[in-house]
Image (cartoon, rainbow, N blue to C red):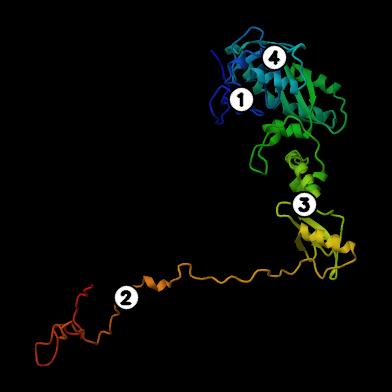
Amino acid sequence: MEYKLYNGGCCMMGKGCCKNNNKLNSYDWLSDIPESEKTTDYVEVQFKNTRKGYYLNSTKIPLVKGDIVAVESSPGHDIGTVSMTGYLVLIQMRKNRMRPDSEIKRVYRKAKPADMEKYHEAKAREHDTMIRSRKIAEGLGLQMKIGDVEYQGDGNKAIFYYIADERVDFRQLIKDLADAFKIRIEMKQIGARQEAGRIGGIGPCGRELCCSGWMTNFISVSTGSARIQDISLNPQKLAGQCAKLKCCLNYEVDNYAEAQKHYPSKEINLETKEGTYFHFKTDVFRNLMSYSTDKNFAANIVTITSERAFEIINLNKKGIKPDALIQEKKSLTPQKEYHDILGESVSRFDDPRRKKRRPHGNAHENASGHTPHAAANSGGNNHHSGNNRPFRRRHRG
């Protein structure tokens, strides 16, 4: 019996994509090429959250993306999901600076029912182990936070992921954890961004966090990235779920830096007869620059184009001060008069044969000059009492 982990989610079904909704999932765009599968025997195996490893399929087991396999570990074996096969694995190994000729662990077999039983038993103990380990670390007075615990597939080993601002001596902690849980202990320090990637979540943009979706390398982010993009330095808006500056602040900073080369320097003040104006904000998308009469806060904001700013700077260099920042617009073209494009009046659509109705008190005469429905009696009363004019159908044409 073959096992596949279906954690939900929806995607296109194909060789390069499976139902696994794992973090850092990659689409194998070379999966439809037969030569790609035969290029290498190395496979990429993904474990809990963002941990991945590369293993050698020495026994030529037919593996596809989504298979659950037992792989070599120290000690014992571990259980993971095949996340990539073929030539794309070699590209990922080079990216992670792993050499194919180095000693790489092997794939043992596809997971059996006995392997899956041990796997689920070990995973069921992870949360309780994390809670107890936090209390043990707190009792030792260690300045650290244990953010996650990952058991090996056979339950003989556990990895404790922790965060610490300073160096921590956890030798006594390892002894206490080994005595408490009777397993082999491995401590692994991670950063705040890596912890957010392991836990996961939804960002303010409404999408999955980049650190848990596709990012593998974390580059430091500084407030200078926000200044270059003229983003308000509000810590609550600039910080992500990891309490660090958002990684997306670095995505477009190079484009902003290149675009601002075509704008005047922010340090140059504009001199006018009204006073001195200081740079306040630059709108790169609309090619507009805002200036304030006060250097420290927004006051009497005036927005002009970058061309107008360059024009005033050139005038100031010549010792000339314009009357105001905004130049009065002079109409160079006369106002257009709108005419009927057909050259005719729209009244041509009126029906000339249509006649207006006369008041009800008047009699209508036919073409012979006689009044229809004349009164039969001498009193001159018509057949319709209460109405001076009898009903008559209007004939057109």
Distance from the alpha carbon under mark 2 to that under mark 4: 93 Å
Splitting the image into 4 quarters, where does residue 97 fall?
Answer: top right
The residue sitting at 66% across, 11% down in the picture is 57
Q: Which residue is mark 1?
A: 29
**Residue in front for this viewpoint, 392 or 144:** 392
Expressed as whole percent of the image width and height from the top left, the position of residue 161 reads 76, 26
- In this picture, residue 353 sits left or right of residue 8: left
Q: Which residue is mark 2?
A: 352
> Total marks drawn?
4
- Choose the circle earlier in sequence order: 1 or 4: 1
Residue 118's quadrant in the figure? top right
The residue type indicated by label 3 comes to Ser
First of labels 2, 3 by sequence position: 3
Work out whether residue 210 or residue 50 is closer to the camera in this orientation and state it: 210
8 left or right, relative to 321: left
Dot 3: element: loop
Query: Do tag 4 and tag 3 residues touch (Cβ < 8 Å)?
Result: no
For disc 3, the marked residue is: 232
Q: x and y percent of residue 103 in the render?
A: 76, 11
Q: Give the residue type at disc 2.
A: Pro
Mark 1 → mark 4, Cα distance in angstroms: 21 Å
Of 25 and 338, nearer the camera is 338
Q: Is residue 45 visible?
A: no
Q: Position of residue 361 (x, y in %)?
A: 24, 87
Q: Secondary structure at mark 2?
A: loop
Tell me the residue that label 4 is attached to. Answer: 55
Dot 4 crowding, Cα within 10 Å, few <14, some 14–19, many 20+: many
The image shows residue 180 at horizontal and vertical percentages of 76, 20
- For the residues labelled 3 and 1, the Cα–Cα distance comes to 40 Å
How far apart, in angstroms, are the residues tagged by discs 4 and 3?
47 Å
